[in-house]
Image (cartoon, grey):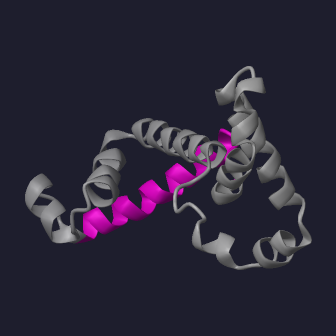
Amino acid sequence: MVQDVFIACYKKYEKIDEIISLKSWIFRLAINKSKDVLKSSAFRKVVMNSHLFTLFLSKELSPEKDLLKRSEEEFLSLSVLSLPVKYREIIILYYYEECSIEEIKRILGVNPNTIKTRLSRGRVKLKKLMERWGYDGEQA
């Protein structure tokens, strides 16, 4: 396409004095050539039916999905913070800080079975709390 624009400019070189604004004329020429390529059936067959677009799909979330994800994470964080302290500290250490049961035992000085029980009860309380506040658990 760029070559086509340069060829068109070369062909009109003798009449360059008649063109009022060279810059805008070249832009207009490039725009028209682009439109011609997009309208062509060859472009539609090759590009539109190609799996080429799947290679260029972004790995990042769309802005809408990113906003939903952040609001869900914020809602979850607020829900965790509203739990009683004995459940909150276990959930934060286990899920947010990624500590093992053994590490939590050393940090809090609590029996591992107590940690497992509080973790289980904390999950149940968190689930009930989130359901009560209207979170259905389905992601977009």
The secondary structure making up most of the magenta span is helix
Residue occupying the point 76% across, 42% down: 29
Residue 126, image x and y in percent?
A: 51, 50
Locate residue 68: give its quadrant. top right
Residue 139, image x and y in percent?
A: 66, 57
Q: Is residue 8 left or right of residue 75?
A: right
Residue occupying the point 64% across, 55% down: 2
Looking at the image, residue 58 lies above or below residue 47: above
Farthest residue to the top: give it. Answer: 20
What is the span of residues highlighted in magenta in the rendered image?
113-137
Given residues 140 and 1, the one toward you in this image is 1
Given residues 95 and 124, the one toward you in this image is 95
Asked if the magenta segment contains residue 55, the reply would be no
Q: Quadrant of the N terminus?
A: bottom right
Residue 23, image x and y in percent?
A: 64, 29
Asked if the magenta segment contains residue 131, the reply would be yes
- Asked whether residue 40 appears in the rendered view, the answer is yes
Residue occupying the point 51% across, 51% down: 125
